[in-house]
Amino acid sequence: MTTMTAETATRTAGPGAAVTLDAVTRTYGEVRALDGVSWTFPRGTFTAVMGPSGSGKSTFLHCASGLDRPTSGTVRIGGTDLGQLSEAKRTRLRRERIGFVFQAFNLVPSMDVEQNITLPLQLGGVEPDRAWLDEVVRRVGLAERLRHRPSELSGGQQQRAALARALVTRPEVVFADEPTGALDPRTARDVLRLLREAVDQTGQTVVLVTHDPVAAAWADRVVFLSRGRIVDELVAPTVSTVMGRWESL
Ligand SMILES: Nc1ncnc2c1ncn2[C@@H]1O[C@H](COP(=O)(O)OP(=O)(O)OP(=O)(O)O)[C@@H](O)[C@H]1O
């Protein structure tokens, strides 16, 4: 029998905050890439982050996910203040509690699909839960491809493998930075559907950075960044409402 620690109890609690930013600023020299951003991503929600080029989207995602440290302000994953963690503990938290999907799939060329998908578990010294691995592989439609190398897959298949790798640890939060940017519309839709399922079927939290109103319309809400600040929010977006808001930015 496993004992539920206070931390796992918090992590599996129903409503609440998955990610909280409080007055987060990130400067690069004179440039304020993020300028005092406060935002809460509730658990089990899908949020798209949009904004013009240079508005701070990637900086936002990197600070919110612990890949980068803000110049000032606080970021919490669940109840954990990332600023209080050593580099090693932050790395471990990212590995265990966060999934990442990027436009460049970042698969390891010398490993086959299964090895790539289970890499975060290997790095953490955790045995794969075979039933969950099978479920993730089934969802992304790669059951027939587990022994293939990334170079033997199409772009869409590679992105689905990257998504499976992001989901295999059952992360609380999946951060995705333009994951469909290099995909054709149909394959992009498959990837977005999988992200949507991670929210609807598994209660995970998804934060998606995108330029694409079609991708944003899969989210529960869209937040708009401009010059490092959140300037607008759209709940229950559709392609046309996203485009309308985008044009008025
Ligand atoms: N490592 C860095 N060094 C210096 N300036 C940076 C760095 N990273 C980002 N910036 C600056 O911070 C601002 C926000 O950049 P960021 O990449 O977050 O924007 P973005 O909205 O993701 O842009 P894009 O849509 O073009 O990818 C920009 O002015 C950028 O030049």
Image (cartoon, rainbow, N blue to C red):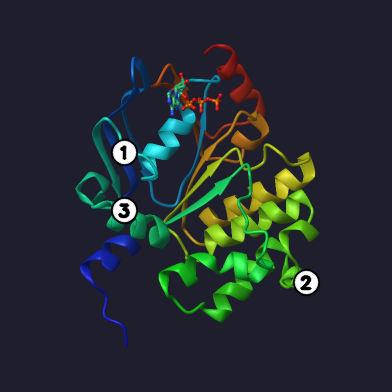
Q: Which residue occupies the extreme front position in the image? A: 110
Residue holding disc 2: 144
The quarter holding residue 6 reads bottom left
Horizontal relation, residue 17 to residue 151: left or right: left
Residue 42 percent coordinates (x, y)? 37, 45
The answer to which of 43 and 93 lies nearer the viewer is 93
Describe the element under mark 1 as helix, strand or loop: loop
Observer-side mark, 3 or 2, equals 3
Please tell me which residue is depicted at 80% across the width and 60% down the height of the picture. Answer: 152
Residue corresponding to mark 3: 90
Residue 69, numbered label: 1
* Residue at 52% over, 13% down: 249
Q: In the displayed image of the protein, which residue is found farthest to the top?
A: 248
Number of dots carrying numbers: 3
Q: Position of residue 156 (x, y in %)?
A: 74, 50
Kind of residue at disc 1: Arg
